[in-house]
Amino acid sequence: MSLPAATDSLMKLVTFTWRNKTSIGAVRDDTVIDLRQAAPQLPETMRRFLEAGGEALEIARRVVESARDAIPLSDVRLEAPVPDPRKFLGIGGNTRSHLEEVRAAGVPIRHSPHQTWFNKQVTCINGPYDDVHLPRISHELDYEGELAMVIGRRCRNVKQARALEVVAGYTVCNDISVRDWQLRAPTATLGKSFDTHGPVGPWIVTADEIPDPHALSLRTWVNDELRMDGRTDEFLHSCDEMIAELSSVFTLEPGDILTTGSPAGVGALMQPPRFLRVGDVVRVEVERIGWIENPIIEAPADFVYLPPRGMGA
């Protein structure tokens, strides 16, 4: 499988595995620079790196400019950029086109003028090119390609005018949903949290490289068929509004992932519904950031021991 081209000068932060070792890195052209090898004083994980703040980021920038040793991007395994966020939250019904298709289909979901948030349990985090499981307890597996924000500062009660200051960067997410389980309860948490149903990546493009997160195209393909074709300027609640709302209730922390909503085109609302099946491949692309691509496979039937993350398995 080919990886996204990384030939421009955007600052891209990655978590990657190479030769059975997982580390944090930065992409330069079509290579990855191991930040920990070049600057051992940097933290070992992306979440700890983000917690270290601007000083760590400045060290990373200097390393990218001066490092001589680099690994071909095609030789590494890209992991979820933040494999262990403390929070993974999604906003529901946040684009005009998606809300219109829900209404047209007569789905019994009451739309609130307020922001509607749900939890995706952090154990659903998945890599940008890893397999996604079709559950054995439901075949109503659906896709929702989205832009995601990664929080970079611990913060509370952030004013909207300064909200984007706490964003470390942006990444791509597929808010995979199991629709019948999603509709079991208003929280939607169960249907949003199956293992492997949170692919994120391929990297974090730092916030200074994305001057306006509301001016990006957002597209999702199933196999080679374009299913979603929208833009982030159709958000009903802007990125800064989201951060102001959430931080008025609880503390946001470095590494937290906030997904921002998908445009129209979900499989569940097609006539007839077109849910994902084994063998399908879902690709989500966000302008200026890149794309993720995940094959659908059958979920394992029996108990499986999962080794700790970051062991290069």
Image (cartoon, helix red, strand yellow):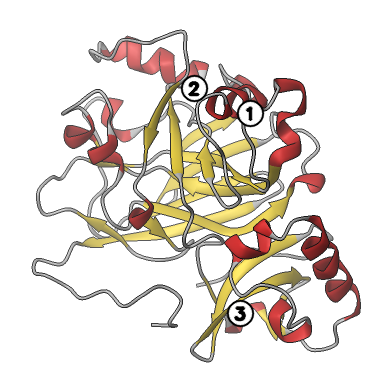
Which tag is nearer the camera, tag 2 or tag 1? 1
Which element type, helix, strand or loop, lies under badge 2?
Answer: loop
Q: Quadrant of residue 251?
A: top right
Which element type, helix, strand or loop, lies under badge 1?
Answer: helix
Residue drawn at point x = 15 percent, y = 45 percent: 139
Percent across and percent down for residue 268 are 27, 31
Q: CA distance from mark 1 to mark 3?
A: 33 Å
Mark 1 burial class by Cα count in 10 Å: few <14, some 14-19, many 20+: many
Q: Is residue 241 left or right of residue 9?
A: left
In this orientation, which residue lies closer to the viewer: 150 or 293?
Answer: 150
Q: Quadrant of residue 58?
A: bottom right
Mark 3 burial class by Cα count in 10 Å: few <14, some 14-19, many 20+: some
Percent across and percent down for residue 247 are 57, 29
Q: Which residue is mark 2?
A: 94
Q: Which residue is mark 3?
A: 74
Percent across and percent down for residue 181 are 18, 36
Q: Which residue is mark 1?
A: 239
| Amino acid, disc 1 | Cys
In this orientation, which residue lies closer to the viewer: 59 or 133?
Answer: 59
Residue drawn at point x = 57 percent, y = 52 percent: 255
The tag earlier along the polypeptide, 3 or 2, is 3
Q: Is residue 137 left or right of residue 117?
A: left
Which tag is nearer the camera, tag 3 or tag 2? 2
- Residue 69 appears in the rendering: yes
Quadrant the C terminus occupies: bottom left
Q: CA distance from mark 3 to mark 2?
A: 35 Å
Q: CA distance from mark 2 to mark 1?
A: 11 Å
